[in-house]
Amino acid sequence: MPSQPAITPAICLLLPYYVINVLRYPATTGGTLMLVTYLLTILAAPLAGKLSDRIGTARLSSLGLAVQGFGLWLVGRLNSETEYLALAVALGVVGRGLGTFEASNMSSSWARFRVASKVSPAASPA
């Protein structure tokens, strides 16, 4: 499975070509499909941030990556006859996993930064 930082650029770069050239949808349809991923990312992130405070960041980050992996598996099963709804669901699953992973991962990063700033004043923001 590709690493998490490779997922978003791959979707941003390759998906429009797939939607326009392979599925023969107009560019506006490609744009709305791209919107599905990011809309679900935006909706998932606040919930994941709250959950990471309750259940911990490690489990939630793992869950987010697993959901992303499942979504990418769904995207990988697409072909030239894929319907709009199937593609939208696959991208929605990717977006949900992306939002879950990013929020919990950032929570973990900021927690480490706060600990470092308590230990070393040089690590605290100006």
Image (spheres, rainbow, N blue to C red):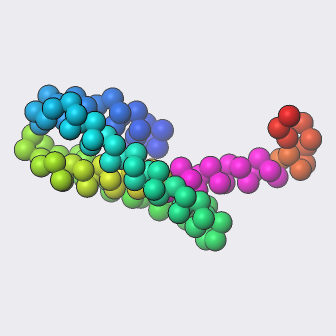
Q: Position of residue 19 (x, y in %)?
A: 19, 35
Q: Is residue 94 visible in the rendered structure shown here? A: yes
- The answer to whether residue 38 is above or below residue 104 is above
Q: Position of residue 48 (x, y in %)?
A: 54, 61
Q: Quadrant of the C terminus?
A: top right
Residue 50 occupies quadrant: bottom right
Q: Residue 60, image x and y in percent? A: 54, 63
Q: Residue at x 40, y 53 (%)?
A: 40
- Name the residue located 53 percent from the left edge and 50 percent from the top edge: 102
Measured as percent of width and height from the top left, residue 28 is found at 22, 34
**Magenta residues, as a range?**
100-115
Is residue 21 part of the magenta span, yes or no?
no
Q: Is residue 101 visible?
A: no
Q: Position of 31 compared to 110: left or right?
A: left
Image quarter for residue 121?
A: top right
Residue at the location (39% across, 49% down)? 39
Query: Residue 122 sits in which quadrant?
Result: top right
- Check residue 110 for magenta coloring: yes
Which of the pair 32/9 is nearer the observer?
A: 32
Query: Could you tell me which residue is drawn at 64 percent across and 71 percent down?
Result: 54
**Is 76 in front, or is 95?**
95
Please, what is the dominant secondary structure of the magenta stretch? helix
Locate residue 107 relative to residue 123 in the image: left or right. left
Q: Front-most of 2 and 75?
A: 75
